[in-house]
Image (tube, rainbow, N blue to C red):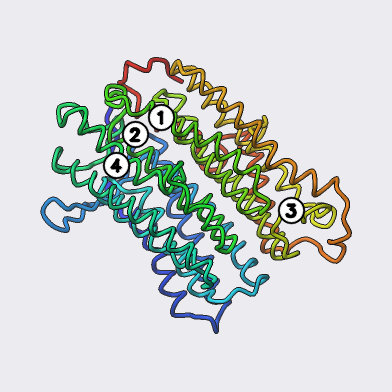
Amino acid sequence: MAPEILLDYRPLWAIMISLAAAVLILLTGERRANLRETWTILAAFGKAAIVFSMLPYILSGNVIEIAPLHVAKGIILQLRVDTAGMLFAALASTLWIVTSFYSIGYMRGHHETNQTGYFASFAVCLSATIGIAFAANLLTFFVFYEILTIATYPLVIHSRNDEAIKSGRKYLAYTLIAGQLFLIAIVWTYLLVGNGDFAAGGFLNLEHASVGALQTIFVLMIIGTAVKAGVMPLHGWLPAAMVAPTPVSALLHAVAVVKAGAFGILRVVGYVFGPEVLGQIGTADVLAWVAAFTIIVSSLIAMQQDNLKRRLAFSTVGQLSYVVLGISLLSPLGFLGGMYHIIAHAFMKITLFFCAGAINVTTHKTEISEMKGIGKRMPITMAAFTIASFGIAGFPFLVGFISKWNLALGALQADKGLFIAVLIGSAMLSTTYLLPVGYMAFFKSSDKFTKYGEANYMMLIPIVITATLSIVLGVFPNFGANFYDLAVMSAQSIVKSVQLIGGGF
């Protein structure tokens, strides 16, 4: 049965509310900080309310659209809410709330300058993220994808020092060049098909072009999206961007940028090409091995980093490739595991970055070797860090276990059991670069931190919330936004008529 389509403007309002907030934030300025931050909080809750108001209709198997905007002949912008888009939008809107409170605590505690520009750029980033989630076609996706790139740049260079400017240029060089390759592939697709409307199971096939042409289009699209996802060797901008304030790092790694890249790969694989065509042209296997390489090598590099944020950055490079690997398996459970890992990684990694920021604001320590004994003075923060570290390693009863279990089953389902060894190896490596931080914090002695305590409550409460949700979602994976059901429904829609992968849920 075809899904019912509801014509509704809520997808547009979900995008516009934070754009309106950005304008109000800029008009309010530095002199009225409380009012400026009030706009941020109101927009965050308003966006989440709009997104979640659409959730019951999407869970019933239907979709929501708004009337397309015909910019010119052949140039159509349209928003459409399906299960995959709802999964990403619900995640982003939820985490924006906790990140907004955390940002206020961080900015005040760190006495940061240019806070108005920070909060305004943050709001625009969330508008672009929701636009990416709700894009109905390739062109609309590309427009919001590039808006996200530009809106993130002021956040990366927030400190305005030489290192920040250099990192910002590197970020733009990577993402804008890759974006132009993505645009070439989009234009090529429109010339072949006449449109770029996303369709579960894909719309491009061998009737439209030769194997070589489809392979080239696929590679161009994957480069355009894999840059933001941090897939090696396109990851160089990500560690460099750690010069930004910690809430920006949390945005980059958990809420918007890298998740937008991973979500883009999902759209390309599942909604542009589809499993059947990718099986015929043989490109998915190559992408899977690139992801496996990234998972292992990034973990090895992370082990060598003493700077906590850089270690977490290389962890993200590897963890996002779990998503890419799952999607590339082209099996039902591979898609499920990949999509749910977008959720799992977001809650775990934002907790880790929140903890890193709390340590920095409170003690001004950034190097892991300087953190011996810090757990005795910041027990809540370091307990949350340790919980998230166990989750990243895939321990049972934490959210990371749910996604990685499905990824392993997806590898078996696709008859590619060797990738299970990659997952196990990565889990073991993650225990060597994350768990020792918690061990040092609680079981090593130092008198450096006797005068310190926990961070301010505006930072501490978000840390507790995201760490708690990392546990709750590991036991009840549908808690709150029905993330697991949305991932199942998305995977089913992609593979519903594909015979070559067999099996099911």
For mark 4, give the secondary structure.
Answer: helix
Q: Nearer the viewer, mark 2 or mark 4?
A: 4
Distance, label 1 to label 4, CA atoms, is 16 Å
Residue depicted at 50% across the width and 38% down the height: 483
Distance, label 1 to label 2, CA atoms, is 8 Å
Residue depicted at 44% across the width and 33% down the height: 290
Which label's residue is closer to the chain start, 3 or 1? 1
- The reply to whether the C-beta atoms of the residues labelled 3 and 1 are less than 8 Å apart is no
For mark 1, give the secondary structure.
Answer: helix
Asked if residue 162 is positioned above or below residue 430 in the image, the reply reads: below
Tag 3: amino acid: Thr
Q: Which residue is mark 4?
A: 220
Q: In the picture, residue 199 is in which quadrant? A: top left
Distance, label 2 to label 4, CA atoms, is 12 Å
Label 3 Cα crowd, 10 Å radius (few <14 / some 14-19 / many 20+): many
Asked if residue 153 is positioned above or below residue 232 in the image, the reply reads: below
Which label's residue is closer to the chain start, 1 or 4? 4
Q: Nearer the viewer, mark 1 or mark 4?
A: 4
Q: Which labelled disc corresponds to residue 95?
A: none
Q: Nearer the viewer, mark 3 or mark 1?
A: 1
Q: Where does the image place residue 406, in percent across and percent down from the top left?
A: 53, 26
Distance, label 3 to label 1, CA atoms, is 36 Å
Distance, label 3 to label 4, CA atoms, is 42 Å
Q: Which residue is mark 2?
A: 269
Question: As drawn, which residue projects farthest toward the left?
Answer: 73
Q: Which labelled disc corresponds to residue 381?
A: 3
Distance, label 2 to label 3, CA atoms, is 38 Å
Q: Which residue is mark 1?
A: 328
Tag 1: amino acid: Ser
Residue depicted at 69% across the width and 59% down the height: 366
Q: Where does the image place residue 445, in percent across and percent down from the top left?
A: 88, 51
The residue closer to the viewer here, 359 or 397, is 359
